């Protein structure tokens, strides 16, 4: 097989894989939306309710009673394209720091394709603050120095010790703003 033909064949395979991943992502999102169909956007008199679809710039969180879906839309960074990224986890604990701030401790159940720095079966934290009826600030726990990987723990006990109010400032570099 000539080099041009190999490149074309590899390119076609890559395109098919990309289309397959996008279809899978769309099915996953549709399932999440169906799960949220019964969720209210707020409590009585506009109280803060964590569950719902929180939309940011280029990413969003879908939070149900038992799961978190974090979806980052694909795009380009420094001239290199990247696909949509998805992180899914089961909520194992919600630690409230105040009425409208805290951390979700999740057990990672799925991470793809570029959320591969996350390891399925490990625990991580998603911090939130300034929660209101219609907006919130959130961020995933990350090392704020090289190698800039997500912070993960092997057990729920270790996660409770790590993902605290005092550690939020060392785990979150940028608090994203999200609205319902």
Image: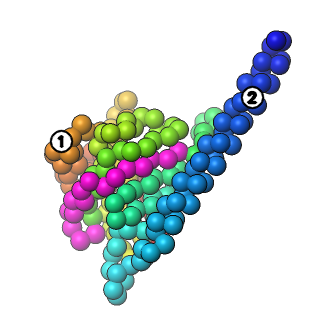
**Residue 146 image point, x, y percent:** 36, 30
**Residue 42 image point, x, y percent:** 38, 78
What secondary structure is marked by label 1? helix
User: Residue 158 has which mark?
Assistant: 1
Marks counted in the figure total 2
Q: Is 120 in front, or is 60? A: 120
| Magenta stretch bounds | 85-100
Res. 18 image quadrant:
top right
**Is residue 11 found inside the magenta-colored segment of the image?**
no
First reached walking from the N terminus: tag 2 or tag 1: 2
On screen, 34 above or below 1? below
What residue do we see at 21% from left, 40% from top? 155
Q: Is residue 60 left or right of residue 172?
A: right
What residue do we see at 54% from left, 54% from top? 28
Can residue 36 be seen at all in this image of the molecule?
Answer: yes
User: Residue 11 has which mark?
Assistant: 2
């Amino acid at each position: 097989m000539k080099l041009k033909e190999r490149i074309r064949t590899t390119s076609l395979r890559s395109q098919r894989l990309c289309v397959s991943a996008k279809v899978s992502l769309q099915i996953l999102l549709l399932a999440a939306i169906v799960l949220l169909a019964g969720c209210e956007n707020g409590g009585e008199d506009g109280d803060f309710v964590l569950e719902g679809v929180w939309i940011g710039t280029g990413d969003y969180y879908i939070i149900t009673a038992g799961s978190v879906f974090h979806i980052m839309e694909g795009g380009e960074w420094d001239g290199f394209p990247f696909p949509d990224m998805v992180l899914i986890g089961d909520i194992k604990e919600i630690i409230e720091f105040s009425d409208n701030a805290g951390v979700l401790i999740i057990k990672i159940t799925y991470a793809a394709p570029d959320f591969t720095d996350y390891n399925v079966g490990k625990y991580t934290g998603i911090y939130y603050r300034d929660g209101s009826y219609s907006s919130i600030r959130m961020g995933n726990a990350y090392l704020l120095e090289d190698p800039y990987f997500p912070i993960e723990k092997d057990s729920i006990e270790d996660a409770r010790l790590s993902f605290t109010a005092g550690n939020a400032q060392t785990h979150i570099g940028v608090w994203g703003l999200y609205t319902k």
